[in-house]
Image (cartoon, rainbow, N blue to C red):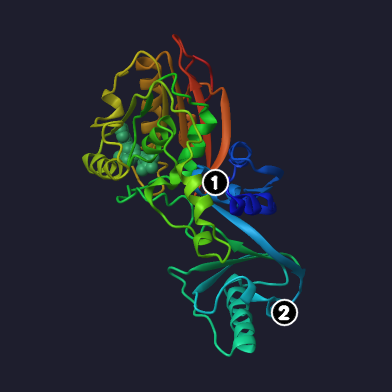
């Protein structure tokens, strides 16, 4: 460890990693594995401490973080003028240079402040005015590709101002070139796989793979490929205290041991979707690690004697099959008839249709696919798995 590295890693500070609902425990475990000390698990967020190395590692290696914030200061305010004054009072030139571009994001849950867009504008004015006052010139705003991203979070009268170390959301790994009709968020897909506890001891199958998100995230886990390895940039690389040596070290670390069994197979009844999945798999450099085939679930027989299946069928919202209930009922029939010895997990935002699967689930997690509340259910398929009728009676 160099002197420079020792100095920067010894300085520990508080950070907040944002995640999706239901993935807080998984993200906490990831952060602990990266050397962070978890202080609290909150709603869609984990608060932790660590040095610069931990900040870089969570951004580069965490599969279930959406972004990582570094708090700057907080204050209480109940009107926009007070907010402006407090932000104006901060020494912004200690955080970034006037020739760097910046943007402000805001999240507001308050009876005192109504419009998050207006808060972001007010904060931007205060930062610009502060630079103008001290230096006679002002930094430019760039909402598309800013060097520095400032995050304002307001809960009632409490305002937290943070630096967003990630910039673009971390679900944008950089491998996706094609979107399916209803692609899963990469962070959600990685979280779902972690919730199943898959460790490569059985093959991984997604029979409704769409654009291939679950397959790609599974392969990245199985081959210990970090989410940051596709060349995306992070906002912390534009910070005044950015340490290239630490980032190089962090980004060449192997944090996980690759799994042993790595059969990863995807099917979809749409040729178009399989073409999109192929493009993404190709871009993720996983062509030799993921098999893809056009096939309907109706005609699918188990490709291996045992396996872990994760599927994300249409909910009938964005994709409208003629009879969504029939699709789920058929899914239950096929799982029961053709997949004994498998464990199947289904994510669905359609509770009525989910019931039509008609199999007993042994685990259930509530997750959100964008703003759609979903259930993620585990079905253990053994010989003679019980099937329930539409009214719930055991058959
Ligand atoms: C919600 S999308 C899956 C999205 C995918 N998880 C992703 O991240 O891109 C549902 C997929 O199920 C496929 N599908 C619908 N009915 C099917 C069936 N009977 N057999 C196989 N695939 C089916 C659709 O073509 C669609 O790609």
Viewer-closest of 99 and 77: 99
Q: Which mark is residue 76?
A: none
Classify mark 2: residues with Cα within 10 Å, few (<14), some (14-19) or many (20+).
few
Q: Residue at x 64, y 88 (%)?
A: 133
Q: Is residue 371 visible?
A: no
Q: Nearer the viewer, mark 2 or mark 1?
A: 1
Q: Residue at x 45, y 42 (%)?
A: 252
Give the quadrant of the N terminus: top right
**Quarter holding residue 122:** bottom right
> Disc 1 on helix, strand or loop?
helix
Q: Position of residue 39 (x, y in %)?
A: 73, 45
Ligand 1 location (quadrant)? top left
Viewer-closest of 375 and 177: 177
Image mark count: 2
Report which residue position mark 1 lands on: 57
Report which residue position mark 2 lands on: 89
Classify 346 as above or below 88: above
> Disc 2 on helix, strand or loop?
loop
Q: Position of residue 232 (x, y in %)?
A: 41, 54
Q: Position of residue 320 (x, y in %)?
A: 35, 45
Q: Residue at x 68, y 50 (%)?
A: 10
Classify 23 as above or below 139: above
Viewer-closest of 352 and 68: 68
Q: Position of residue 311 (x, y in %)?
A: 41, 33
**Quarter holding residue 82:** bottom right
């Amino acid at each position: 460890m160099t002197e420079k590295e020792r100095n920067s890693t010894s300085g520990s500070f508080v950070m907040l990693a944002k995640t999706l609902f239901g993935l807080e425990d998984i993200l906490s475990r990831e952060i602990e594995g990266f050397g962070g000390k978890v202080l609290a698990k909150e709603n869609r967020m984990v608060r932790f401490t660590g040095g610069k190395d931990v900040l870089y590692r969570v951004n580069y290696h965490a599969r279930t973080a959406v972004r990582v914030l570094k708090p700057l200061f907080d204050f209480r305010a109940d009107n926009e003028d007070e907010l402006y004054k407090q932000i104006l009072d901060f020494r912004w030139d200690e955080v970034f240079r006037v020739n760097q571009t910046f943007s402000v994001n805001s999240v507001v849950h308050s009876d005192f402040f109504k419009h998050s867009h207006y808060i972001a504008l007010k904060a931007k004015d205060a930062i610009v005015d502060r630079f103008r006052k001290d230096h006679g010139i002002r930094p430019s705003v760039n909402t598309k590709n800013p060097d520095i991203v400032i995050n304002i979070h307001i809960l009632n009268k409490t305002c937290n101002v943070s630096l967003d170390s990630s910039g673009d959301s971390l679900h944008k790994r950089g491998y996706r070139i094609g979107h399916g009709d209803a692609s899963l968020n990469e962070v959600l897909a990685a979280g779902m796989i972690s919730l199943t506890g898959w460790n490569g001891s059985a093959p991984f199958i997604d029979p409704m793979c769409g654009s291939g998100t679950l397959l790609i995230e599974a392969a990245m886990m199985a081959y210990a490929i970090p989410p940051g390895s596709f060349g995306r940039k992070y906002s912390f690389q534009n910070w005044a205290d950015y340490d290239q040596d630490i980032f190089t070290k962090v980004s060449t670390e192997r944090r996980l041991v690759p799994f042993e069994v790595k059969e990863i197979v995807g099917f979809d009844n749409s040729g178009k979707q399989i073409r999109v999945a192929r493009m993404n798999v190709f871009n993720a450099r996983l062509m030799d690690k993921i098999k893809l085939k056009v096939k309907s679930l109706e005609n699918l027989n188990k490709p291996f004697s045992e396996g872990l299946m994760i599927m994300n069928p249409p909910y009938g919202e964005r994709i409208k099959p003629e009879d969504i209930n029939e699709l789920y009922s058929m899914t239950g029939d096929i799982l029961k008839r053709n997949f004994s010895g498998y464990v199947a997990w289904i994510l669905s935002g359609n509770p009525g249709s989910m019931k039509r699967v008609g199999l007993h689930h042994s685990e259930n997690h509530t997750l959100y696919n964008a703003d759609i509340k979903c259930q993620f259910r585990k079905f253990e398929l053994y010989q003679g798995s019980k099937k329930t009728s539409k009214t719930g009676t055991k058959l």
